Amino acid sequence: MNYSQTKLYSVLKNKCPRCHEGNFFETNNSYDLKKFGRMNARCPLCNEDFQREPGYYFGATYVSYGLTVGFGIALFLLFCVVFNFETIPFLLVFTALLILLLPLFYRFARLIWINLFVNFKAVTKE
């Protein structure tokens, strides 16, 4: 199995969880603030449905929470080792970085969530 057949590839490259070729979100730029949350309704190549049912992506909020907590713990440990942990600078940096990383966490959470339920299946080209 090569890298392009892994779920990690699908998440990091904004690809369809089924074929790993079509884009999941309309744009690859997470910081295009007008379009960062717009998903394609279906994969343009394999026709996988991305708009499953109302409330399907509610579970992605738990994934986003996990990403945020993991990031916070990593940053906390970095502050403990490098800066002998001072509360105010940590909170300021953590808050600023969370605001900057919000579009990435949002997209990664949705991609991780759908990848939990959809398996890779290569598209056969005729």
Image (spheres, rainbow, N blue to C red):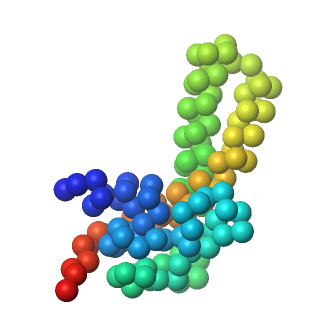
Of 30 and 64, the residue lying toward us: 30
- Residue 56 visible: yes
Q: Is residue 62 visible?
A: no
Write the residue at 61% across / 58% down. Answer: 30
Name the quarter where the N terminus is drawn.
bottom left
Q: Is residue 47 left or right of residue 27?
A: left
Image: 91 above or below 35: above
Residue 45 quadrant: bottom left
Q: How many marks?
A: 0
Q: Position of residue 34 (x, y in %)?
A: 72, 68
Q: Residue at x 73, y 28 (%)?
A: 90
Q: Nearer the viewer, residue 107 or 73?
A: 107
Q: Is residue 79 above or below residue 56?
A: above
Measured from the top left, where is residue 44 in percent x and y?
43, 82
Residue at 43% in and 80% down: 43
Image point 52% across, 83% down: which residue?
A: 41
- The quarter in which the C terminus is drawn is bottom left
Q: Picture quarter containing residue 115? A: bottom left
Farthest top residue in view: 84
Position of residue 5 in the picture relative to residue 94 (left or right):
left
Question: x, y percentage for residue 28?
Answer: 54, 63
Image check: 64 left or right of 100? left
Expressed as whole percent of the image width and height from the top left, the position of residue 46 reads: 35, 82
Quadrant housing residue 81? top right
Q: Is residue 4 left or right of residue 39?
A: left
Residue lying farthest front?
A: 126
